Amino acid sequence: MRLILHTAAYWLLWRIQQEIPKAASLATAEFATLRLRLLKVAARVIESATRIRVAFASACPDASVLKAIATNLRPAPT
C-alpha cells in the first residue's frame, strides 16, 4: 500500500511540474521545492454546487503559477 501511495504522490508532482508555464521561475524546480512553494500554501477553499474556489492571501507570490496549473489540469468540457 505504501508503494502505491508513493507512486501516486510522485505522479501527482510530476504532472504538476509538467503544467507549470515554462516562463515561470518554478519550471525547473525540484520536487521538494514544488512541495514547499505550491502544496504547502494556506488558502481558503469555498465549495459550491457548481464550482470550487480557492482564495489565496494577497501576499502569495506564486498565485499566478497556481492559477495556470489549475487551468491546465482542468478537464475538457463534455
Image: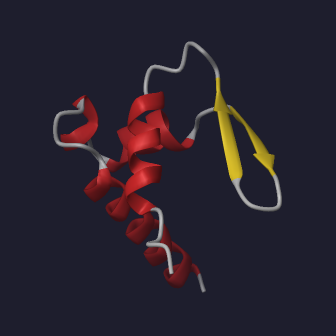
Quadrant of residue 27 in the image?
Answer: top left
Residue 38 location in percent, x, y? 48, 39
Q: Determine the residue positioned at 38% across, 43% down.
A: 68
Residue 13 location in percent, x, y? 40, 59
Does 58 appear above or below 70? above
Residue 58 location in percent, x, y? 60, 15
Q: How is the image coloured?
A: secondary structure
Q: Determine the residue positioned at 40% across, 49% down.
A: 69
Q: Looking at the image, which is closer to me, 33 or 66?
A: 66
Q: Looking at the image, which is closer to me, 50 or 12?
A: 50
Q: How many marks?
A: 0
Residue 22 location in percent, x, y? 17, 42
Quadrant of residue 50 in the image?
Answer: bottom right
Image quarter hosting the N terminus: bottom right
Residue found at the far front of this picture: 78
Q: Determine the residue positioned at 26% across, 58% down.
A: 18
Quadrant of residue 65 in the image?
Answer: top left
For this view, does 6 lie left or right of residue 20? right
Q: Determine the residue positioned at 17% across, 34% down.
A: 23
For this view, does 39 lie left or right of residue 51? left
